[in-house]
Image (spheres, rainbow, N blue to C red):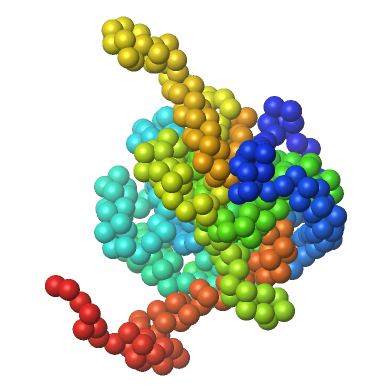
Amino acid sequence: MPCVRYAKSMTRLRLDYANCLTDRVGEHGLSPNLLNDAEPVMNTLTHRLNQSKGTGWERWRDLPFGEFRQSHVKQVKAIVEQVGPNIENLIVLGIGGSALGNISLHNALLPATYNLQPSDLRSGPRVFVLDNVDPGYVGQTLAEVRRTDPDFKNTIVNVISKSGETAETASQFMILRSMLRNALGENHAARIVAITDPSQGTMRSICDDEGYTTLPVPEGVGGRFSVLSPVGLFSAAMCGIDIEALLDGAAEMDGRCSEPDLKKNPAAMLALLLMELTKKGKTNHVLMPYCNALYSLADWFRQLWAESLGKRVDVDGNEVFAGATPIKALGTTDQHSQIQLYRDGPNDKVIGFIEIEQFENDVTIPSGLGVESLAYLEGATLGQLLMAEKRATEFALVESQRPNFTITFPKLDAHCVGQFIQLWEITTAYSGLMLNIDAYDQPAVETGKVATFGLMGREGFRDWKSNVEKALGTSDNVIV
C-alpha cells in the first residue's frame, strides 16, 4: 500500500448526515435507533466487501494499490512523456464510463477557462471529450481542432473502448482515423492512443494490425468504475493533473470504508441512509455541488447510481424493480429553479450537498456602491456568499422536513477528488448488497444496443430492425 502524502486531518472528506435523522426532519428521517440496530448488518456487509475486494467485478477496488497502481501509473506516464511534448489538442473518444469520468476529472481539476488559455499558460493540451454522436457537436469540435492544427501534427486521439464495437465510439474512431490517415498517411499511428482490452476484441485486433499505442482496460473493472484506471488517468496526466494524488486519496478513503464501525465508515453510513430513506419513499436522490467545478461529478454519479442499482430482478431472480433516480443540481443556480419543487413538491427526495471549505481563489465584493440595501455584501467574498446560500438552503429544507446530507471537501484538489470517487463507488457496492442485486451488470442497456445494430444494418441483427418497426411502426398520433 502506498504511503499517503497528505496530512489526514487537513484533507479528509467529511459526511454530515444529521439532517437525515428524525430529530431534524421528523417522520421523514431515520431514527437513531434504526442506525444502532443496523450496525451488526452493516458490519457483516463490510466483512463481505473486505473479503471480495479485488476479486471478480470488484477489481476496481485494487486500482489505488499495489501492482495494479504501479503498472498503470508507469505505463501512463511513459506514454505521456512519449507523446506529450508540443501537443496542442487531445481528443478523447468514449461514451458512458469511458467519458464521464474523464470529463469530471478535467472539470474538477483544471481551470474553467483551460481550453481558452494560450499553450504557455496551460498544463497540457486542450482537451475535447466527444461523448456523443450528435453531428453538430462532433463537427464543430473537429472544425475547431483543425483550425489550430490542420495537419493533425500536434493532436492526439485517445479512443477508449474495451471491445471496439460500441457504435458511438466506433463511428467516431472511424471518422478520426480517416482524417488522420488523410493528413499523415502511415505516420498517423503515432497520433493514436487506444485504451482497450489487453488481449482480445475488435479494437485490440485493430491496434495490433495498425501498431497503435495502447493502455489496458483492466479485467474486472466495468466502465462506470474505471475512472481511476488508465481510462481516466491517461487524459488527466496529459493535462497535468496529479494522478498519484488522485490514487492516494482513493486509497485513503478505501481504508476508511473498510472500517467495521459504522460511525467511522462513510460509505457504509451513506448506503444505509440512502437505502433506508428509499424504503420511506425517498426514491429520488439529488447531488447538488456548491461548486461549478464539481458539477460534472454529479453526472458521473448519475451513471454510477442508475446503471448499478436500477435492476428489475434481484440475484435470486425475484422481480424487485430496484433503484432510485439520481438527479443533479448546482448551487446556487438551482436554488432558483429546483428548490421550489424540493421544498413544496412531493417529499420523495434526499438531497446531497457538496461544499468546499476553502476555495483557492476567492473574490472580494468591493465597497462604494452606496446602496443601503446592498451594504451587507460589501467586503464579503463570493465564497462566503456561496456558503451562506448553501447553509440557508439546508435550513429551508430542514424546515420543510426534507432529508439532506453534506459532503465537505476541505479544499478542491486531486487528493479530495480521489476520495470522493472511491467513496461513491464503495457506497454503490454496499447498496447493491443491501438491495440483493448485481451492481455490476446492465442488462437493460443491451436492447437499445442491439436494436441500433439492426437499424444500422449490421449483419446478424437484421431481425431487430423488423422488431423495432413492428413495435413502433408509423404513428397517427402526431400534431403538426
Tell me if residue 14 comes above or below residue 215 in the rendering.
Answer: above
Q: Nearer the viewer, residue 79 or 22?
A: 22
Give the quadrant of residue 416.
Answer: top right
Give the quadrant of residue 352.
Answer: top right
319 left or right, relative to 258:
left
Tell me if residue 424 comes above or below residue 384 in the rendering.
Answer: below
Residue 411 visible in the snapshot:
yes
Residue 154 x, y percent position in the rendering: 39, 47
Q: Which quadrant of the figure contains the N terminus?
A: top right
Q: Nearer the viewer, residue 361 or 323?
A: 323
- Residue at figure coordinates x 63%, y 54% from the top left: 277
Tell me if residue 388 comes above or below residue 475 in the rendering.
Answer: above
Residue 175 x, y percent position in the rendering: 35, 66
412 left or right, relative to 272:
left
The furthest residue to the front:
27
Residue 307 x, y percent position in the rendering: 56, 65
- Residue at figure coordinates x 61%, y 34% from the top left: 409
- Residue at figure coordinates x 62%, y 74% from the top left: 320
Residue 78 x, y percent position in the rendering: 61, 48
- Residue at figure coordinates x 59%, y 75% from the top left: 312
Residue 428 visible in the snapshot:
no
341 left or right, relative to 15:
left
The furthest residue to the left:
480
Q: Which quadrant of the figure contains the C terminus?
A: bottom left
Tell me if residue 279 comes above or below residue 375 in the rendering.
Answer: below
Q: How many marks can you see?
A: 0
